[in-house]
Amino acid sequence: MLKSRKVSGRGEATGGAAHYAFGALDDDIIIKHRLLTRTTTTRGEPPLKKLQKKFTSFALETEKDSENYAECERLAKAFLQELKTFELPLVKTKAVIDANVREKENFNELNDKINRKIVEAHDDIEDLKKQLEESKVERKHKEECETIRKLIAAQPPRSQTQKLINDLEKEIASLEAENTASSRTLELRKKQFALLLHVVDELQNTIEEEQKSMMEEMRMAIYENKNIVEDATVSVAGGSSETPMAID
């Protein structure tokens, strides 16, 4: 939409408030009216109105009864001249319209072409995005492979690793043999210790039995000795009593 014209009064300051002669809608109506009437300026008489006046003058002159052929011819020539003058801008306008139509068709074709290019560009962008994602995944895989390769390269050779494995297997076998021998020795020691405990227990029982026997024998001996002493005492006591009696 065209901007409304700004009209400044005489003596108005440059920095003052803006005043508009017509509103935006009125401006459009005026421009449309000027295009229809071939009026390009607000000054002077519109060409269509001038043409109408020429035709009206010629028509009125032909309706008169007097013989005025010369005046009618003059007015007819003036009307035709004014018609040619009015027709020339119309021809120019038609040429401009045709050029605008062709330009519009070219613009539509160009617009369609640009839209197709935009669609193709969007498709290309999507394809490039997919390729970018695939490239990122591929690059990630390559980086992981490179990391694994570096780890593998940092490891010792296979022959050295195999030799180390063989040495460890031999050491494990040796330790297992030692463990088996130790287990057997421990089992033997357990049996020997159990036998020793049994022998000690039997020996202790034997010693206790012997001690009991000795104690019984000692007790019997003491008892016999005691009986002997008592018998001897009785005998001595009996002898003493018999002797005085003999003296008496």
Image (cartoon, helix red, strand yellow):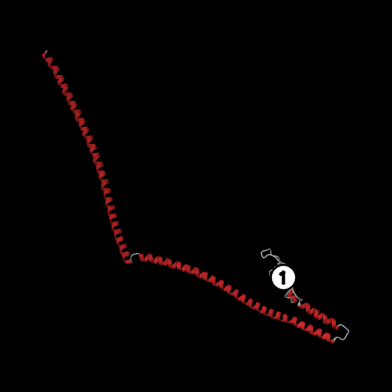
Residue at the top extreme of this rendering: 248
Lateral position of residue 140 relative to residue 19, left or right: left
Position of residue 166 measured from the top left corner of the image (x, y, whole percent): 30, 63
Position of residue 167 measured from the top left corner of the image (x, y, whole percent): 29, 61
Residue for badge 1? 28
Residue at the front extreme of this rendering: 11
Residue lying at 12% horizontally and 15% vertically, measured from the top left: 244
Q: In front here: 103 or 81?
A: 81
Residue lying at 63% horizontally and 78% vertically, measured from the top left: 106
Position of residue 29 measured from the top left corner of the image (x, y, whole percent): 74, 71
Quadrant housing the N terminus: bottom right
* Position of 242 relative to 172 (above/below): above
Quadrant housing the C terminus: top left
* Position of 82 relative to 161 (above/below): below
Position of residue 24 measured from the top left corner of the image (x, y, whole percent): 71, 68
Say if residue 1 shows up in the picture: no
Say if residue 231 shows up in the picture: yes
Q: How crowded is mark 1: few (under 14 residues within 10 Å), some or many (20 or more)?
A: some
Q: In front here: 35 or 181?
A: 35
Residue lying at 81% horizontally and 85% vertically, measured from the top left: 74
Residue lying at 31% horizontally and 65% vertically, measured from the top left: 160
Residue at the left extreme of this rendering: 247
Amino acid type shown at disc 1: Asp
Lateral position of residue 185 relative to residue 111, left or right: left
* Position of 131 relative to 77 (above/below): above
Q: In front here: 35 or 72?
A: 72
Lateral position of residue 66 relative to residue 183, left or right: right
Q: Is mark 1 on a helix, strand or loop?
A: helix
Residue 147: image quadrant is bottom left
Residue 109: image quadrant is bottom right
